[in-house]
Amino acid sequence: MLTGNEIRKSFLDYFVKQGHTIVKSSSLVPEKDPTLLFTNAGMVQFKNVFLGVERLPYTRAASSQKCLRISGKHNDLEAVGRDTYHHTFFEMLGNWSFGDYYKEEAITWAWELLIKEWGLPKDKLWATVYQDDNDAERLWIKISGLPKERVLRFGEKDNFWEMGEVGPCGPCSEIHIDRGSEACDRKGEKGHRCQVNGDCARFIELWNLVFIQYNRAENRELAELPAKHVDTGMGLERIAAVLQGVLSNYDVDFMRDLIAAAERLAGKEYGASAVADVSFRVIADHARAVSFLITDGVTPGNEGRGYVLRRLLRRAARHGRMIGLREPFLHRVAAAATEIMGGAYPELRGERQRISETIRGEEERFGETLEKGLLLLEEAVGKLKRQKKKILAGEVAFRLYDTYGFPLDLTEDILRTEGISVDQTGFEKLMEEQRSRGREARESEVYIKGAATLVPSQEVRFVGYDRLDAESTVLAIYAEGQGKEEVGEGAEADIITAETPFYGESGGQVGDRGTIETSRGDQMEVIDTQHPTPQLTVHRGRVKKGRIQVGDRLHLVVDAKHRRRTVLNHSATHILHAVLREKLGTHVRQAGSLVAPDRLRFDFSHAGAIAPDKLEEIEEKVNERIRLDAEVRIEESSYEEAVRKGALAFFGEKYGERVRVVRIGDFSTELCGGTHVHRSGEIGIFKLQGEGGVAAGVRRVEAVTGEGALDLIRRYEQSLREIGELVRARADEAVEKVRKLLQQQKELEREIERLRGQFGKDQIPDLLAKRENIDGATVLITRVDGVDAKQLREIADQLKEKMGSGFVFLASPGENNVTLVSSVSPDLTKRFHAGNVIKEVAPIVGGGGGGRSDFAQAGGKEPSKTDEALKRVWEIIKKPTIP
């Protein structure tokens, strides 16, 4: 029996013999297509080749590609666990031709590998072709010898393959296998008939041969590609199940090993319960998926890829509860996935710690709300059953999402077993209301929206990349909540001009400041510049002199120092991003930034704090790149060309057909609309100020550059000089002098501690002399001066030991507080309860406390009432029964 690893190797070796180049699997995060959430097929990394915009040094390729199908057109999430052959993550074995061979070779090699190399029974195989693909049907009959009745035609739904809503596509031909009637998972269903594409587990697709010859446009029209290509895909899990003689993908060797890890943790066996089996399959699938996602740089979040990862983690956590796993467990199953898959994908082992930390952190956070959310859902389901209803209110689903972190599909998954659905309309209405609130909150101020409404179709031309002043005309004025024809001296207003050198805040870079002056000499100070829409730039400021009118000719001047310092920080941010990816890994992705004149802030995906020595290494590398004085080249190109040449682009960002590419030397290339230096050396100095976490899987670094860095260094030097003066040492000797003084202080503190302890011990005889006998019990109630809380406890223990049997109550007043300790020997706890005594006495000294029957402690803020408290203790113990 071939193992999964052997099948993968056998496939690749076979196609090497056919002249193919083995290509490493690309990331689950598409590097060349930020419009695609995840890599969902082996051909994703070759999309630009199929479109004719990229050429490779080879025309034949083969690989085993990491794939995830959990979004958009290809989404298998709902089926995972409920059947035995769907996955979110899977490996796709594939071979490609880029304008080289076509249908005949693809069909020949597929048939030869399956029949001659792997020995599959010919009489169990079927082929399908697109409904009007006569050529493919003819070739199948000729090459395989299959009878015509086992070469079936199907329509676009089954035999026309598309990568997504747009992009390369074409007719496809599939190979199916008949696994026998025992494999059918729909036996007994009325009207069901086992057949190819019959939606049961008897006939399953093994291999899809796609003949790519079209490009699907956004208007759904098809255009012929410059050359014809072949793109094939075969799921490793499915072919492994067939070759290993098992009916379930989850019974193949590598998936069974994953399930075994969950079995050990749960103390239950897979196969013993149909309900539990679903959970075991979900856990095995999701553990593998999240491990690869985290390795490829995805971190849990509330949007995009991060939210998909979070959904998988939380879905797995819920299924863990269903098999008795109440503590964090998925990180341990993921550790097994790392070992099982690490041979083929060594990057998993390199990220082992980050995978574990990310998963465990998310498990612990969700664990805090999971129980409460499940309880709420259980109550809601019970109510629906009593009312004999089958739809959960959207309000309840939204509350589960918003308060308890339940993704909608998790709620639907739980309800599915009860035959209950969710009011999607109600849920979406509440979600949209929440999104609207968020949008309104994100609007910096109403004036920005208001100003934009005055010239909705106008585009303000930005001329400030190479100059800091310009002449223009006032198009609109917005003030006091409405459009104005003019504003006078002292008024705050928002001005829109036909063109401007002022950069409006966007991409993390703050807006410019400066002045606006009319030809009459009227002046306005610009305190901020914003981009309410991609087309508009709004100048906000105060009229300092005269008046500003619609139609006025203006001279606009940007504050050069403010812009210059901002520019240094922006270019430094690009260099920092490149260095972070180099030093921490390509999983690092920008998650937010602030580029201001006085500092820069950069948020990025990464799990766990960065060690101080690594931060020093990053800082040094950034400064090394700055000292190279590399040229900063800025050019415009098509989006496709920019990404093909290596520019960093990010999922969720909106890019037009033409983009601006900023290249710094040969080490940084990003799409960016901001302002930058001409050479990296202009930045001068880069100095990190701090690093920390801002969200799960997101870190933040803050830094200064240029004059800001120099100012920071000068402040450090001044602080060092002042410290030197305080300790009477030169600045370069101050640290060592402070270290010696701190050591002396520690030694003195230890000596004081020793003396206090000795002082306490010396008081023991005098304190014992104050014992009294109350109805046959030895009682000691007194104050002890000059000791802290720890020493007071030790004295109480020593007194109780010396007394053998007795009740001890001590009070130690300080300057602003008082400590109370009550200690009772075991034989007297029924008579004197230490905790109850403390509880009654502590309020007298302005405190509170309590404790066990044999020991209790409290603190108070009114030491002047110590004697009153001690008097009350005497009153309590003299009572016949202690409360």
Image (cartoon, grey):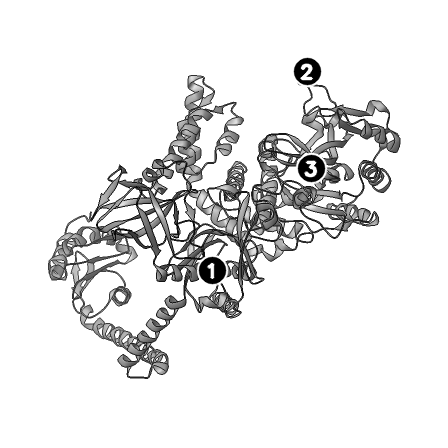
Q: Describe the element under mark 3 as helix, strand or loop.
A: helix
Q: CA distance from mark 1 to mark 3?
A: 50 Å
Q: CA distance from mark 1 to mark 2?
A: 66 Å
Q: CA distance from mark 2 to mark 3?
A: 26 Å
Which one is in front in this view, the residue at disc 1 or the one at disc 3? Answer: 1
Residue found at the very far front of the displayed protein: 520
Q: Where does the image place residue 394, in percent across and percent down from the top left?
A: 42, 27
Q: Which mark is residue 191?
A: 2
Apparent side of residue 54 relative to residue 313 in the rendered image (left or right): right
Evaluate whether residue 598 shows in this view: no
Quadrant of res 460: top left
Residue drawn at 42 percent across, 34 percent down: 400
Q: Which mark is residue 571?
A: 1
Q: Disc 1 residue type? A: Ser
Q: Where does the image place residue 582, in percent across and percent down from the top left?
A: 56, 61
**Which is nearer the eye, 761 or 170?**
170
Q: Disc 2 residue type? A: Gly
